[in-house]
Image: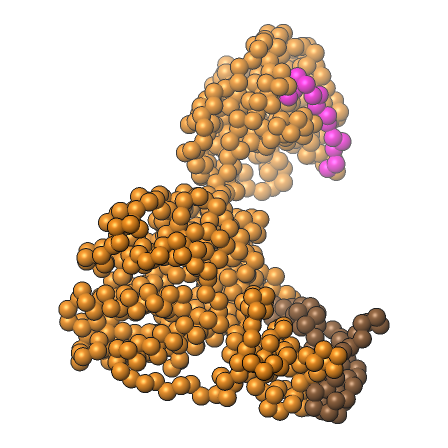
Amino acid sequence: MNNKPNKTQKNPWKCGKCGGELTLGMIRASYLGNEFEVEELKCLKCGFVLITEDLALGKMFEVEQSLENK
Amino acid sequence: MEQDELKRQEDKCIQENPPACTAGCPIHLDARKLMLDIQKQDLKSALATMQKKQPFPGIIGRICDHPCENVCKRKDVGTTIAISDLERYCVQNQTTTVKKMKVPPKSQTVAVVGSGLRGLTVAYDLAKKGYKVSLFEKADRLGGNLWNYSEHQLPPEVIVEELSVLNRLDIQIKLNTAITQQDLAKLQEEFNVVYLGLADQSNDVVELLGEHSSVDLVTCATQTPGLFRGSLVGNESPIKSVADGRKAAVSIDRYLLGVSLTGSRESEEPYETKLYVKTKGIAPLPVVPMNDESAGYTTEEALQEAGRCLNCQCLECVKGCVFMQEYGSYPKSYVRQIYNNDAIVMGLRQGNKMINSCSLCGQCAAICPQGLDLGETCKATRESMVSKGKMPPSAFDFALRDMAFNNSEEFALTRHQPGYNSSKYVFFPGCQLSASSPEQVEKVYAYLMEKLDGGVGLMLRCCGAPADWAGDQELFQNSLKVLVAEWESLGKPKLIVACSTCHSMFREKFPELVSLWELMADLDLPVQDPNVSGGKVAVQDACTTRHEPVIQDAVRHILARLGYEIEELPYSKEETKCCGFGGLTSFANPELAKKIVEDRISESATDYVAYCAMCRDNFAAKGKRTFHLLDLIFGTNLEEAAIRPRVGFSYRHENRAKLRRKLLHSLWKEAPQEKEGAFRTINLLLNEKVLEVMEDRRILIEDIQQVIELAERTGQKFVNPDTGHNLAHFRPFKVTFWVEYQSQEQGFVVLNVYSHRMEILEDGHE
C-alpha cells in the first residue's frame, strides 16, 4: 500500500498550509486494532498525509476488506 | 449455529436427494445422468454411468425390466421416458471398456455356485474388491437363463463378450461342476465364504440346504456362518436378480471385513425419493416413437427422447431468488458454508459478504416444500457475528447511521393531532416514505385526520428495521424501547403504519396495529379525477407482507375501487420477491441489489404498482414505470409519478428534516430551531456526475460540507497550483471523507469525493 507517484505522473498537490512540496515518508495507519507503517506522500512540516482516490479505493480498500473478514 | 441445528437445516434441503428413477431402480442407476450423457452425445460417459452400477451393461442394458420407468416424473406431463430403450441404444452403439483393477488383491476366498445373474453379480462385485473368487457352474457355459433370451434381444456374442470380464478379473471358472450337498460341505471347508446363486424357495435351494434353508431377507445370510444365498423368489426380473446378488456381495464383503451386516442398509432397496420436482407449467410431451422398433432408437431419436428428461431437480427456492443464484449453489451447501464461516477461529471469513447479502425476505421458506428459511440462518449468523465483534463494520454502517439520523431530533417527532390532548390513533409513516415522498405523508395525515374521529397523533421516526436486519439486537431493542415510550406518552393509541417493514417490526409488539391499506380499503377514498383512473397495473407485494394476506388483499381491493385492472406477477403475495432493500442487501452488496431489481422488473411489461417506498424507488431508478399506491390514491399527474426518479441519500435526509419542520410549523404552529453547525452554511455546487458518485460511495452533502468548512477554516488541505483545485479531508466518525473542490463566488464546486475507513495516525493529519 503506497502512494508513490509513478515516474510519468507528477504529484500535482502541495501543502495548502505551508505551500511546501510533499515527500515520501513512513506513516502509521490503523484499522480494527491493526497498526502498520507504510510509505506515503506527506508534508513533512505540517504532517498532512495525502491519500489519493486510487489508493483509497484500491489497495487501502482491499486491506480494509481483508481485515474486516479476519 | 450449533452443529445439530446445522444438521437440521441441511436435512431440510432435499435438492441432493436422488431423482425418482434412481431411487426406484433396484441397483440405483443414475438414469438422470445417463439422459444428460446421451443429450451431450457422449456415449463413452453414458456407458461409464451404466457401468458404475450395472455389472454387465451390454447384457442388462438389453434385458432390464426397468421399474424406473414406473416412477419417472415425466409421466405427470406426457409419458414416462423410455429409459430402457435408451440404455439399449447406448450399448448397441458403444462397447464396454473395463478399467484395470486398482485394489490390492486380498487373500480371502469366495466360492460362488451358479452363474445366473445373482451368481455373476456376486462374483463380479467381489472380484473387483480383490477377493479370490471361484465360480462353479453345472452347465458347460456361464449365464444360466441369459441364454433363454431371443438372439435378437440378447445376441450370444454379447453374452460371451460381456462375461469375458470375469476372466480379466482373475475369477476361477469351473464349468460342468454341479454342487451336491457333500460338495457344499467341502466348499465351506475350502473357502472363507460360499454363495449359492439360487432363487429363494427354489427346488435347488431346498435340495442343497434341506431344513437349514432359511435366509435373512436383508443380508442374504443363512443360519450357517459364511454361507450366503439368494433372498429373492424367482428369476422374472433380471434387474432384481442383479440387486439380489449385489445385496449378498455387500454382506459378504462386510462379513469378511468383520463389520456389521445389518448397519445402514435402508437405502439399498428401491424407495420413494424426497426430491421435490415441480411439473406444473411444463409442456407435456409424448414418448419419441422408433422408426424401426426392432433396430431400436436411431441417434436422432435417442437425442430427442433423452431430451424429454426433466433432469429432475428441486431448486425451487433458487429459481425464485437472485441471491441464491448469485452464489451458484443451493441452501444445503449454503448453510454448511455459513456454519463454517461462523465457526472459523483463524483465517479469512470468506462467507461474510454472502451472509450479509441475503434480503432475509423469507421467499425461500414460502416456496420450499420443507420450509427451509435461509434468511433465518443468515440473520442468526449476523447476530452471532455482531455479538462476537466480527461483523465487518463497512457492511451496514451507513444504514445504521441513517437510522440514527431518523431517530435524532432532525426527524423524530411525537405529537397529538393539533387541538387534541389525546389520540385514539397515531400515524407512523416510516422514514422511507417520508424521504421518498414527504408530500404524500402530508396528504395521508390530512386525510386520516379528516376521516377518523378521536384524534390522530403523528410519530416520525425509524422502526428499527436496519438494526434488526444488521444483526444488532441490542440497538434494535433500545430503539424499540424509546419508540414504545413515545407511543405510551400518547396514551397507547392504535398504530397506523404506511410501511410494511414497520408493520413487520411492530407485529409482535403492538396488538392494536393496522396497516394504512387495511384502513383505507374500508374508508371513502379521496375523490378521483375521472380522467386519470383505470388501466392495468402489476402489483409488487412488499416482501415484508409475505404472511399478511389481509394487507395484500386490501391493496388489491383499493386498486379495484380505483378502477384498475390487476396483473399478478409470477411471484406474488406469499411468494413475492424483495426489491433488494430488505435485509440491507443494497448496502452490503450493491451489485447484487442491482441484479435483484433488474430480475424483478423484467417479469412484466405492465406498469408496476408498489406499496413500499423502497420497492417503488428501486424499480423506478432502473427505468421501470412504477407507481406508489398513494400516487394512484391521490392521483395527480400520474405520468410524472410513474417515472419520478429515486431520491438520493443526501436528499432523503433533507426531505425528512424538511417534513418535520414543515409539519411543526403548519400544523402545530411551532418554529423549530434551525440546526446548529457552521458547516450547514457551506453552499455546494453539485453536478449530476458528482451526485451519482456520492450516491454510489454513500457520501452525503453534510459530509462534504463538513470537509470544506474545516479545510477553509484551518487551511488543512492540499492545493494544486496549476488548476486551483483543493483536496481536503475530515474524519467525523470511523470514515475519512476526501473532497476535491474549487472555490467560486456562489459556493464550492465539488469535483470528486471518496472515502476510506482506515485511520492515518500521523500527528497533525486528522
Residue at image position (41%, 44%) is B606
Q: In the orientation shown, which residue stands out farthest toward the left? A: B453
Residue B70 visible, this angle:
no
Quadrant placement of the C terminus of chain B: bottom right
User: In the picture provided, is B178 more to the left or to the right than B547?
Assistant: right
| Chain B: drawing colour | orange
Residue B9 position (above or below residue B154): below
Q: In the orientation shown, which residue stands out farthest toward the front? A: B745
Give the x, y percent position of residue B760.
66, 82
Give the x, y percent position of residue B321.
48, 49
Magenta span of residues: B90-103
Q: How is the image coloured?
A: by chain
Give the x, y percent position of residue B192.
65, 32
User: In the picture provided, is B146 more to the left or to the right than B627?
Assistant: right
Residue at image position (63%, 40%) is B257
Residue B649 lies in the magenta-colored region: no
Front-lying residue, B713 or B309: B713
Magenta: main secondary structure equals loop
Residue at image position (73%, 27%) is B98
Front-lying residue, B400 or A34: B400
Residue B510 position (above or below residue A12): above
Give the x, y percent position of residue A12.
76, 78
Front-lying residue, B564 or B731: B564
Residue B305 visible, this angle:
yes
User: In the picture provided, is B107 more to the left or to the right than B226?
Assistant: right
Residue at image position (58%, 79%) is B748
Q: Please identify the quarter of the rendering in which residue B92 is found.
A: top right
| Chain A: drawing colour | brown
Q: Please identify the quarter of the rendering in which residue A59 is found.
A: bottom right
